[in-house]
Image (cartoon, rainbow, N blue to C red):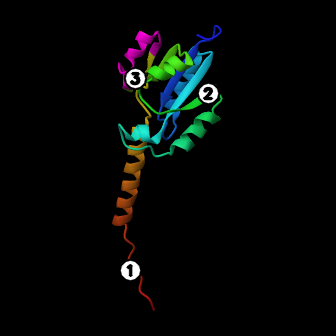
Amino acid sequence: MFKDKTIVYTSGTFDMFHYNHLRMINYARSLADILIVGVSTDELVSSYKAPPIIPFNERLLILEALKTPDIVIPQHTLDHTEIVKKLNIDAFVVGDDWYGKYDYLKDLGVQVFYFPYGMGISTSNLKKTIHDSYASTLDSQRQAKPENIQQS
């Protein structure tokens, strides 16, 4: 806590920014007097899954354009120990797909909230929907070959 203000940190890749990203950030905002949002760099994301579709600088600008965060910062590591200490973080919010992975922050006096995305939209689902739609379109185009046109 800083001057009786609750500082909350949330972070993520925020690739192909969607409704569940917004819900999690809004939830974090509801807990915070000061909300800091970390955006994972391309290098960090690529260290544990496929590289993001949207480049880091663009993802950072998208988050900065939101009214919700007070501060948007790059996230270079999945270990939040240093950021918690340097910025006096009181609470951390992350998607429940990371459930249990940040419990170590509790030992530093940080409340950890695993936000339930629930069913519905995710970046993985978006990518699959786009891929499947594109594949279906290509398949339809292959099957609907135009008839030969005779020239006179």
Disc 3: which residue: 96
The image quadrant where one finds the C terminus is bottom left
The image quadrant where one finds the N terminus is top right
Which structural element holds mark 2?
A: strand
Disc sitting over residue 119 in the figure: none
Q: Position of residue 42 (x, y in %)?
A: 45, 42
Res. 142 image quadrant:
bottom left
Per the rendered image, the range of residues in magenta is 98-112
- Magenta highlight on residue 57: no
Q: Which amino acid does label 1 sit on?
A: Asn
- Magenta highlight on residue 105: yes
Disc sitting over residue 71 in the figure: 2
Disc 1: which residue: 148
Judged left or right of residue 48, residue 65 is right
Q: What residue type is labelled 2?
A: Ile
For label 1, the crowd category at 10 Å Cα-Cα, with few meaning under 14, some 14 to 19 and many 20 or more, is few
Q: Rounded to the nearest whole Å, what is the CA distance between mark 3 and mark 2?
A: 23 Å
| Camera-nearest label, 3 or 2 | 2
Res. 66 image quadrant:
top right
For label 3, the crowd category at 10 Å Cα-Cα, with few meaning under 14, some 14 to 19 and many 20 or more, is some
The answer to the question of whether label 3 and label 2 lie on touching residues, with beta carbons closer than 8 A, is no
Q: Rounded to the nearest whole Å, what is the CA distance between mark 3 and mark 1?
A: 55 Å
